[in-house]
Amino acid sequence: MGFAAYAAELQGHVSKLPYTLAELQINRAWEAIRRKRLWSFLIREALVFFPAAISTGTVTVTFGSATVVGDAAAAAAWTLVLLGNPPLIQRQFRFGNILYNITAISTTTNPNDTLTLDMAIGAGSAAGASYSIYLAYVRAPSVDFKRWKSVVDPQQGFSIARHTSRQWLDIMDPTRGSSGQALRIADYKTDAADSHRPIFEWWPHQTAQTAIHAIYEVMGESFVASSDALPAAIPESILIDYALSYFAYPWAGANVGRYPELKGTSWLSLAVETKRRVAMDLLEVRRNDEEHCQQMITLFARRSGYPVDASFWQSHSTWDW
């Protein structure tokens, strides 16, 4: 079965339920089920790529202007990474102690020699000035991103702290002068132009090329295509019962006066009884998912002011946990 079949089955239980409303109620039920726990099917994996910093050539900047013009050497370097991973317009331009987001690249005199920034230059005007372009603000791996679960630098053997506040970074490093091995991830903002995808600051700023391994949780997405279906962990009967008890049956009870076909049925009693069944079935499904993948159990958590690498744990391997 798929999305279209789920909506049709809901209509079969409640006559006069409009098909578009049946689709909406199915998606609302699916969203509510996804929020019930950290389901194993909501875990994703990704590599986060950091390109090497670019500082080739020089730039001309003007105080109060959001336009940066590079010389021929700078423009050539920018052209090479226009469609890199990530593309140039997702990287940051550093001039002085301020980071600017690059929003566009165009041409003034040489191909791709002009950058447009998200803010006007706050430092003084300069010609032939040095600069740096690198990735400091990382977009979440997916639009439905919820939170990081585990982030590891496999090259250096470090686990990266995932829940640092931006206020803490502003106190510890207000000029963002620290660069090198990223040790912490802090909230930055959401990208309104990209479905409100979260963006995070990785600190210290990673200026050398590397790839970081990440495990993260997603919120999941609504059904769209008629063939979109549930993951194997969720029985179709639970989705239908959830939509019936919380949405379709209450709708029928509220519309008895409009549709004579709905009279003679105790929709409230049906909703209450179906909710009981859903609660019992969900307990079973949650237990099965927990046995399949223990997402809700934290065996050990450690906070420290410095990274702990694999060598530390190997040297303390006699500890009794």
Image (cartoon, rainbow, N blue to C red):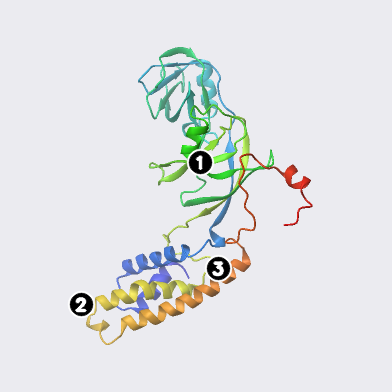
Residue type at mark 1? Answer: Ala
Q: Which mark is residue 258?
A: 2
Q: Residue at x 43, y 13 (%)?
A: 126
Please provide percent x and percent y for residue 286: 54, 69
Residue 318 horizontal side relative to residue 49, left or right: right
The residue wearing badge 1 is: 186
Q: Is residue 44 above or below residue 172?
A: below
* Residue displayed at 59% across by 60% down: 295
Q: Nearer the viewer, residue 204 or 9?
A: 204
195 lies above or below 277: above
Which residue carries the number 3 mark? 233
What is the C-alpha distance between the residues marked 1 and 3? Answer: 33 Å
Identified by mark 2, the residue type is Arg
- Rendered location of residue 146, percent (x, y): 48, 52
Q: Nearer the viewer, residue 268 or 114?
A: 268
Label at residue 43: none
CA separation in Å, label 3 and label 2: 38 Å
